[in-house]
Amino acid sequence: MKITVETVVAAPIEQVWAAWTNPEDIKQWNAASDDWHTTAAAVDLREGGTFSSRMEAKDGSMGFDFAGTYTRIVEHQLIESRFGERTLRVEFLDRNGEVTVRESFDAETTHSEEQQRQGWQAILDRFAKHVEAKQIR
């Protein structure tokens, strides 16, 4: 089953793309809630290149690694990747100075569809806030 989440970012596509693909930015926005954070991120943005991030609870009680391989990249438009047996498609739809970022991914079996949708949506919403805050500075 595929799950799709999306958000609209009020920023130019170049800034949206940069924040999505820059490890320092990823560490700032990649968390579903304030009690989690990303302590490390790496990006080799090319087809066949890899990505990884380490997400941890701020209280140190748990953490996990998220990693995969890029399978298709179309600059400022599309990133497709594989992580384990699952796939992820991220579309960047540039319209009149705003960018819709749409993620479609294979669901996993540990958590409910709704839990997965909420978690991925929360991260995506934090991404939008991060990029828009950088606009104001």
Image (spheres, rainbow, N blue to C red):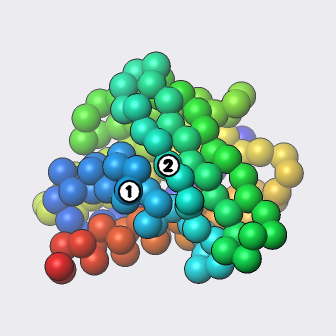
Residue 96 in view, yes or no: yes
Disc 2/disc 1 C-alpha distance (Å): 7 Å
**Left or right side of 63 for 118:** left
Q: Residue furthest top?
A: 48
**Does dot 2 land on a helix, a strand or a loop?**
strand
The residue pinned by badge 1 equals 24
Residue drawn at (40%, 21%) of the image? 47
- Where is 57 relative to 47, above or below? below
In the image, residue 115 lies at what x, y percent?
Answer: 74, 65
In the rendered structure, which amino acid carries the disc numbered 1? Glu
The C terminus is located in which quarter? bottom left
SS under mark 1: helix
- Mark 1 Cα-neighbour bin, 10 Å: few <14, some 14–19, many ≥20: some
Residue at image location 29% in from the left, 39% down from the top? 77
Instruction: Find disc 2 in the rendering and name its residue.
Output: 41
Q: Mark 2 touching mark 1, by CB under 8 A?
A: yes
Q: Residue at x 82, y 57 (%)?
A: 111
* Residue 74 sits above or below residue 64 on the image: above
**Residue depicted at x 47% and y 60%:** 27
Q: Quadrant of residue 105?
A: top right
Rate crowding at label 2 as few (under 14), some (14 to 19) or many (20 or more) other CA atoms within 10 Å.
many
Q: What percent of the width, then of the height, locates residue 109?
A: 84, 46
Where residue 22 appears, x then y in whole percent?
Answer: 34, 49
Is 118 located above or below residue 77 in the figure? below
Location of residue 100 by image quarter = bottom left
